[in-house]
Amino acid sequence: MNPEKVLFGFFIMLALTLNFGFYVGDIDNPDHHDVYELFAAVVVNIIATLLKFGDRSQMGAVMLASSLVAVLQLMAAALVWTLAVYTGDGELTPRAMASIVSLAGGAMLANVVSVVLLLMETMMMRR
């Protein structure tokens, strides 16, 4: 067992599960989506992206691209959340919450692609 690969797989799976945890719930209900879970998803996705920079294979390039998409979408969701709270009346509207959750859903799809690619790469490895 390679500890580096365990850490890599851990952060990829944690990024997906945190993103899924934020995404689940009514799309326009702010009570179903926690800001700290979004923050954790952003941080873990950034860490997972940084870990992918060392892989020079074609599969690693696609995994890095999907991870960059996830980070970009999560940061856009955080930006929409910040703008909605600090430029409005201080409360999230259902429309703003729907935008935030939609962006997080796109990031979750990119994370699913990363996990599928990781599983494919693992299955192709020789002993």
Image (spheres, helix red, strand yellow):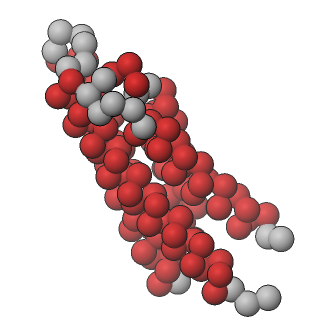
**Residue at the farthest front position:** 26
Relative to 123, is 44 on the left or the right? Answer: left
The residue sitting at 40% across, 25% down in the picture is 32
Q: Can you say which quadrant of the picture contains the N terminus?
A: bottom right
In the rendered view, tell whether residue 22 sits above or below residue 11: above
In the rendered view, tell whether residue 110 sits above or below residue 101: below
- Between 25 and 47, the residue placed more toward the observer is 25
Q: Is residue 57 shown to the viewer in this render?
A: yes
Q: Indicate the position of residue 53 as horizontal and vertical percent values.
A: 52, 67
**Residue at the farthest bottom position:** 126
**Residue at the farthest right position:** 1
Q: Is residue 79 shown to the viewer in this render?
A: no
Q: Quadrant of residue 84?
A: top left
Q: Indicate the position of residue 104 as horizontal and vertical percent values.
A: 35, 44
Q: Quadrant of residue 75?
A: top left
Circle count: 0
The residue sitting at 34% across, 47% down in the picture is 105
Q: Indicate the position of residue 44 as horizontal and vertical percent values.
A: 54, 45
Relative to 83, is 15 on the left or the right? Answer: right
In the rendered view, tell whether residue 93 sits above or below residue 119: above
The residue sitting at 38% across, 57% down in the picture is 109
The residue sitting at 47% across, 84% down in the picture is 58
Q: Indicate the position of residue 119 as horizontal and vertical percent values.
A: 59, 72
Q: Can you say which quadrant of the picture contains the C terminus?
A: bottom right
